[in-house]
Image: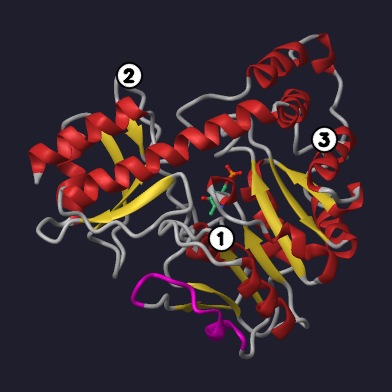
Amino acid sequence: MSQFWSDLVHRLTPYVPGEQPKMDKLVKLNTNESPYGPSPLAIAAVAAAAGNDLRRYPDPNADALKRTLADYHGLAPDQVFVGNGSDEVLAHAFAGLLKHDAPLLFPDITYSFYPVYCGLYDVAFRAVPLDAQFGIDLDDYTGAAGAIIFPNPNAPTGCLLPTADIARLLDAQAGIPVLVDEAYIDYGGDSAVALIARHPNLLVTRTFSKSRALAGLRVGYALGHPALIEGLERIKNSFNSYPLGRPAQAGAIASVADEAHFRSSCAKVIATREALRAALTGLGFEVPPSAANFIFARHPAHAGADLAAALRARAIIVRHFRQPRIEDFLRITIGTDEECRQLVDALKAIV
Ligand SMILES: *Cc1c(COP(=O)(O)O)cnc(C)c1O
């Protein structure tokens, strides 16, 4: 890279997203997208927004979307922040809310974008080891810290924390911000949003990319006390006034209006997840319980990299992380029943 760039840019270790292959006919189970597609109402709203109005800037404050999300969650509009995917919302939080002299704490095995943002925004952090069952022991998070972030359920493990434990942590760490990343909460977990009223140090992030099948639209949001939201708005308005285009705002609003589509998609994914877990357990895999739209699985007799390569040779793509402790695991996105049947058939042949 050119020497014209700063030392900081030279030092970055960028996030590597799961691949989006350009080939057809793949069974793509690597990036936790929904197999069922967005609400038809959302598709229609996006199409309707693709007109002459595109010559105009969108609402910089996305007021209609914020009102929709506030109503949906039983909050006020000033408790809602929206951004270009929850990754952007997280980036703003790392830039200003999670950056302190004392280190930010997050699990050693978690969403691999967190340490990347720490590099970009120069955030001191400490990765706290998960326990032997890949659980987060919140007692590890009650010591000196500048801030805390974890996904619930965690990724890529699928492990869920009860909200009662999160409430205890919020009390024990009332003096620092705690961010709960609920990218996968719609697949069976209880949300921490109910704790916002009593805990001004809690920020919850959500995304339309997984359970609402709108990864291609790039919409995410945060919920919290108005004073936390205000800081995110200050950062956003110092960065990009228009993070959400007109089609994104319209599509997101319509998606929230279609509760039936949302609920039935989540229910199908959950049912398929449990069936897949049982099938893989039957093949000798170790598969911890998951509250997400993926499972995390290891076979005692096969290396993770070998399994991923053998699946790829059969046009099935899953996610494999070359990282200590989890290098023998595959993170498998829950697809349709048919896709999961193809996966099980392939693994049967491989193991
Ligand atoms: C997918 C994911 C996100 C990012 O979602 P986008 O809204 O698509 O940016 C954030 N956190 C976790 C844990 C995720 O898995």
User: For the point 63% across and 38% down, which residue is it?
Assistant: 208
Q: Which residues are magenta?
A: 132-142
Task: Describe the element under mark 2 as helix, strand or loop.
Answer: loop
Residue 51: x, y in percent? 78, 9
Residue on which the image places disc 1: 152
Q: Nearer the viewer, mark 3 or mark 1?
A: 1
Eyeballing the image, is 146 above or below 227?
Answer: below
Mark 2 or mark 3, which is nearer the start of the sequence? Answer: 2
Residue on which the image places disc 3: 65
* Left or right of 84 on screen, residue 339: left
Residue 226: x, y in percent? 89, 60
Q: In the rendered image, is residue 67 in sight?
A: yes
Name the chief secondary structure element in magenta.
Answer: loop
| Viewer-side residue, 314 vs 279 | 279
Mark 2 to mark 1 CA distance (whole Å): 33 Å
Residue 150: x, y in percent? 57, 66
Residue on which the image places disc 2: 24
User: For the point 90% across and 47% down, which residue is it?
Assistant: 77
* Left or right of 26 on screen, residue 13: right
Amino acid at the residue labelled 2: Asp
Mark 3 to mark 1 CA distance (whole Å): 24 Å
Task: Describe the element under mark 1 as helix, strand or loop.
Answer: loop
Total numbered labels: 3
Task: Describe the element under mark 3 as helix, strand or loop.
Answer: helix
Amino acid at the residue labelled 3: Leu
Amino acid at the residue labelled 1: Asn
- Mark 3 surroundings: few (<14), some (14-19) or many (≥20) residues within 10 A: many
Q: In the rendered image, is residue 7 in sight?
A: no
Q: Is residue 165 magenta?
A: no
Farthest residue, direction top: 52
